[in-house]
Image (tube, rainbow, N blue to C red):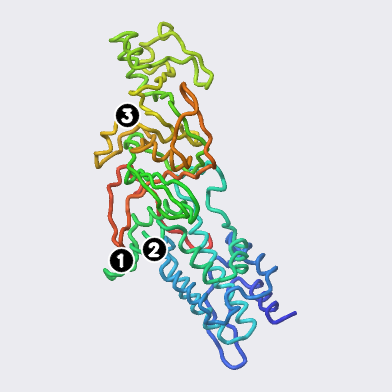
Amino acid sequence: MTGWTRGLALAAAVTAFSPAIAPAQQVAAPQPLSALLPTTPAAAGIASFYQRWNNPVWFRAGADSPAVNQLIAILDRAQFDGLAEGPQLATQVRAAQAQARSGHPNDIATADRVLSAAWVAYVQLMKRPTPGMTYIFPYLAPQGVRSDQILLTAAAAPSLEAYLTAASSPNYLYTQLRDAAMAQALAKGSTSPDPRVIANLDRLRSIPASGRFMVVDSGNQKLTLFENGKPYDSMKVVAGKTEYPTPMIASIMYYMVYNPYWNAPDHLVRKIAQNYLSMGNGYLKGRGYQVMKDWTAESEVLPSEQVDWKAVAAGKVKIRIRQKPSDDNSMGDLKFPFPNGLDIFLHDTPHKEYFAKSDRMLSNGCVRLEDARRLGRWLLGTEPASPADGAEIQVKLPQGVPIFLTYITVQAKDGQLSYLPDPYGWDRVSGGSIKAGQ
């Protein structure tokens, strides 16, 4: 059994670290990390990793390697990521680093586990799913949260320093906001992050680090198109009213629709019924409304005389009303659906006057676009043009494009923070920190 393996066996056998004595000097042992205690979920994964990996992860280039010092710096600032225990973990890592300087295999083995436990706690926070976001496809949610997966990734990284940088900077928007918030707080002599910033960082964590995707931000009512993980283009949008907030969703867009029908939501169907009772069938025909037999794509049109309009107006009977494509159709010329189960989609609108408003939370939850054709060009790579006449013409995109609907009310620009209103109230109920090893 090698000295390294003996050190692993020793560290696995105890629940707390005991002082290790090198031949020439005694070094204070690091305090136990909660993530290493047998009762925590992280402990089993860490132990499993070290049973298979018989070399140090953190001290392979010596006790004072750039990666170890980089880990300390990341943990020192980790409260600005939402990990309140970050500075405490940094102190424990420093103690472990001092112990590893003895060069004794047992000291290095024990100290290496301390750094691994601290890193697992940090990465598990950084990969925590956004509270309140619906991930339609599982692979859109953060991946690789098991302790052994995290450590295997670190151990196999060609450059441990590059891996630490990437893991602690999950995407462009997140890093920009986190670093600006930290700089502003430190300039004021504070080491405590603003809880509102933490809530927004929680929502930004789900944005990819690279690739081609869309982000709809209902906080500032803007759609941003990303290429290679960086903003490429943007436009104004109309988002949901406070009573009908645009939900947070991660999904994939696969197709777009030319000349779409508009299906009126329930609360508007009741208003349409009230207008029908006072104005008759001419009201429906003049606006291109049709009563449908059911909610299927193959549904037949139902004669309006067969509807109990008083019951519909009172909310006792639910019916489907759709509007045919026209200049007045609420969908405009283009619709951009994506799987979500909530009937939320992006679409054109004939009401361009909305985009002159500073507050554009005016919809029933769906997202109206300032320039639907520009989005169509970006998605298709060519000018959007319907391949056929008629309504509801679906065209498949060259490739599926991820779309993330989120809500960002604290933004960073040129290193400065700006705070937007919080009409949905989500800044007050999300965010927070977690404890190491949980």
Q: Mark number for residue 80?
A: 2
Is 295 in front, or is 315? Answer: 295
- Disc 1 target residue: 185
Q: Residue at x 34, y 17 (%)?
A: 287
**Amino acid on which the number 1 mark rests in the picture:** Ala
Residue at 32% from the left image edge and 14% from the top image edge: 286
Q: Nearer the viewer, residue 120 or 324?
A: 324
Q: Amino acid at mark 3?
A: Pro
Quadrant in which the N terminus is drawn: bottom right
Q: Extreme top residue here? A: 305
| Above or below, 159 relative to 62 | above
Q: Which mark is residue 350?
A: 3
Q: Is residue 15 left or right of residue 126?
A: right
**Residue 152 vertical position relative to residue 286 in the rendered view, above or below:** below
Tell me whether circle 1 and circle 2 mark residues in contact (CB < 8 Å): yes
Q: Is residue 317 shown above or below 334?
A: above
Badge 3: residue crowd in 10 Å (few <14, some 14–19, many ≥20): some
Kindly state the secondary structure of the residue where label 2 is placed.
helix
Q: Give coordinates of residue 272: x percent, y percent.
A: 34, 17
Q: Is residue 304 above or below residue 66?
A: above
Other-residue count near label 2 (Cα within 10 Å), few / some / many at <14 / 14–19 / ≥20: many
